[in-house]
Image: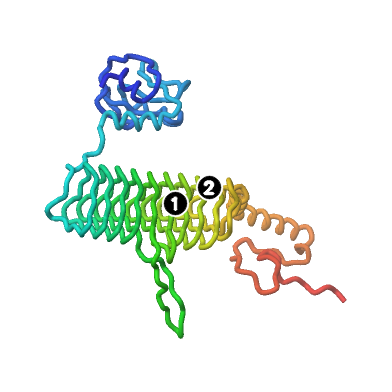
Amino acid sequence: MKLKDLAQVCGGKLEGDGEREILDVGRIDGATSQQVCFIADKKYLPLLEKARPGAVIAAPGMALPQGTPVVRADDPDLAFSKALAALRGEPMRPLPGISEHTVIGEHFEMGENASVGAFSYIGAGVKLGKNVIIHPHCYVGDAVTIGDDSVVYPHVTIMERCSIGKRCTLHPGVRIGADGFGYHFVQGKFVKAPQRGTVVLEDEVEVGANATIDRARFDVTLVKRGTKIDNLVQIAHNVQVGQSCVIAALSGVAGSAVLKDYVQLGGGSGVADHITIGMGAKIAAKTGVMQDVNPGMRMAGLPADEGKAFMRREAAVRRLPELVKQIRELQATVAKLTGKVGGFEPVDEEEEINEPEPGTVTRFIRNRPKPEE
């Protein structure tokens, strides 16, 4: 593809030789004369010294080596994605139709150009929309509906009565509609609470590999339009996830929690049951959210705290070794001047500081003498 055509695909402004042929994309530190790379931050500019790319996608105003053809775009990352799709094409898709090695239940309905791969099981009353792809080795339970243009990758399980919207993507190993984790403790043992609700994914939801979304106890576990869920995420029963949320890998959302629209959960974060995270809130990685979060808040830590307060506290904690040293130096100085430290014995430099005894104020103030009679 000529560079001038690629620039048009990317929606960028070309600077340089538009007749140059670009065949592929490449890494910024290894791109060749027939590849295009991108730079989203000037800190990566030194890497260009190791490469001779055919072109670079960069933001307006970013200085590049002289003579380098450039496609200027306000969002270089997005423009590069468009270039990637144009140069490498769309993912391969199976031919329409049903494999002869598939089990199909009664009253099955399938839209035009849909396909069902080998060794899949399709239950009774299932409805597939137009262009739906069910890859091999999938389980689709009774009365499941899957909307137009959705893709279900291998080894996905969708249990009975669940609903998948249009243009959804379920990556390998996803489990939709398993029982929620609910039990009654009766006479010394756990008795299972029936889980008879469903799961509904609205349009354009993407669920990463080996993520799980449990069915509600009696109502609906809901993931609204445009939300993106990463690999190995757990969404528990009766959870409500708003529109265009982002949930990164290894996160868990406990039962009946509510995530309003545009919430972002960092990797490995956890949300306690029956709490609400307000619209647009951002939860940092490894954060444990135990209480409701107001809209637009940035939270971090375990338990979660307002982001700036958490960072100040963490910065203070990192200074503790330095502060301990300063305290010991001050104690030693006062000891030389007075022979004692404010009524306390100085702490030896090599002495191990143990946890305080009951009744002490800090680990540095101990053996408080009794006031003189």
Whether residue 191 sits left or right of residue 302 in the image: it is: left
Say whether residue 213 is visible: yes
Residue pointed to by mark 1: 267
Coordinates of residue 113 in the picture (x, y in percent):
21, 42
Q: In this view of the protein, which residue sits in the foreground, 360 or 18?
A: 18
The amino acid sitting under disc 2 is: Lys
- The quadrant in which residue 161 appears is bottom left
Quadrant position of the C terminus in the picture: bottom right
Coordinates of residue 110 in the picture (x, y in percent):
23, 48
Q: Secondary structure at mark 2?
A: strand
Quadrant position of the N terminus in the picture: top left
Whether residue 201 sits left or right of residue 312 in the image: it is: left
Q: Residue at x 31, y 22 (%)?
A: 6
C-alpha distance separating marks 2 and 1: 12 Å
Residue pointed to by mark 2: 282
Coordinates of residue 357 in the picture (x, y in percent):
65, 73
